[in-house]
Amino acid sequence: MEIEKIISDVSDERIDKFISQKLDISRSRVQKLIEEECITIDGKKAKNKDKVFPGQVIMVEIPEAKEVKIVAEDIKLDILYEDDDVLVVNKPKGMVVHPANGNQSGTLVNAIMAHCKDNLSGINGEIRPGIVHRIDKDTSGVLVIAKNDKAHISLAEQLKKHSMTRVYIAIARGVFKDKQGVIDAKIGRNPKDRKKMGVVGNGRNAVTHYKVIKQLEDCAILEVKLETGRTHQIRVHMAYIGHPLLGDTVYSSGKNKYGFKSQALHAKTLGFIHPTSKEYMEFSSNLPEEFQELLAK
């Protein structure tokens, strides 16, 4: 059990925001500690709606983070960069990022648990690899993992503010009339199929920028930049404008003369501000062999 004593130097500020900034932990983590009655203001149990004022004494009890039940597995990682705060990897196609029903082993998280050992974030009171963002099982490319809470909060905030650089290479079906464009359409759960996403009026804002690198006979090679990061965003948006990704079996038939059996999508470039040095860092990965063979065809 760790106990932190803070004397307020602000006026009329929410308790969760104040503690989050002072202790460098997430606001959701602070809210959970308040619900567990681990925070007091001048000796009284805090509530999430409370505000703090100058001179008040805030006591915060932080329980030790609980181990999550994920088995560490010695799986080789394609590491692009690593330091005490972040781990940047090139995820291969076919690897699930996080364990879930039907995929309890062989995931990126299983591999990270073995590689990082005790150097993991404890966001929300659980020792776990800092999965800040994800890409689909059959999408390859660059991912950044946070190795501590400070890094996790910093990277998550950058994602929230849409300040990360995220560039994808995709192959979409059809002939494009415009060489570049912006798709601004809200994305949410498909009301007819809850396993799929779709463009829906009550969804969350989603913006995708695309540029045609090369137009081929029946498909085009695209550079795609994400302004937001919704589930399946590129796949949903490209299908929405009538150009589904080649091989995508969820948002199109998936049938193609090239025999590509999953969406042709690769997360090529990722850039962010380093949590400690505050310097901008950018990483890119080569197209996977299968992708290169497809382009050769």
Image: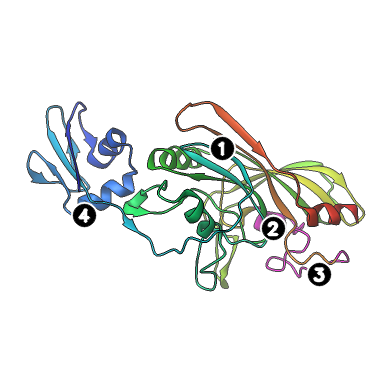
* Three-letter code for the amino acid on which mark 4 is drawn: Glu
Q: Name which of mark 2 and mark 1 comes first in the sequence.
A: 1
Residue that appears at 70% across and 43% down:
285
Earlier residue among tags 4 and 1: 4
Q: Nearer the viewer, mark 2 or mark 1?
A: 1
- Disc 3 is placed on an element classified as loop
Q: Is residue 290 positioned above or below 177 on the image?
A: below
Percent x, y of residue 22: 27, 33
**Gap in Å between the C-alphas at discs 4 and 3?**
51 Å
Residue receiving disc 3: 255
Q: Are marks 4 and 3 in contact (CB under 8 Å)?
A: no
Which stretch is magenta?
Answer: 234-258
Task: Please say whether residue 202 is one of the residues in the magenta stretch.
Answer: no
Q: Which mark is residue 35?
A: 4
| Residue at the spot of label 1 | 164
**Dot 3: within a 10 Å radius of its alpha carbon, few (fewer than 14), some, or many (20 or more) residues?**
some
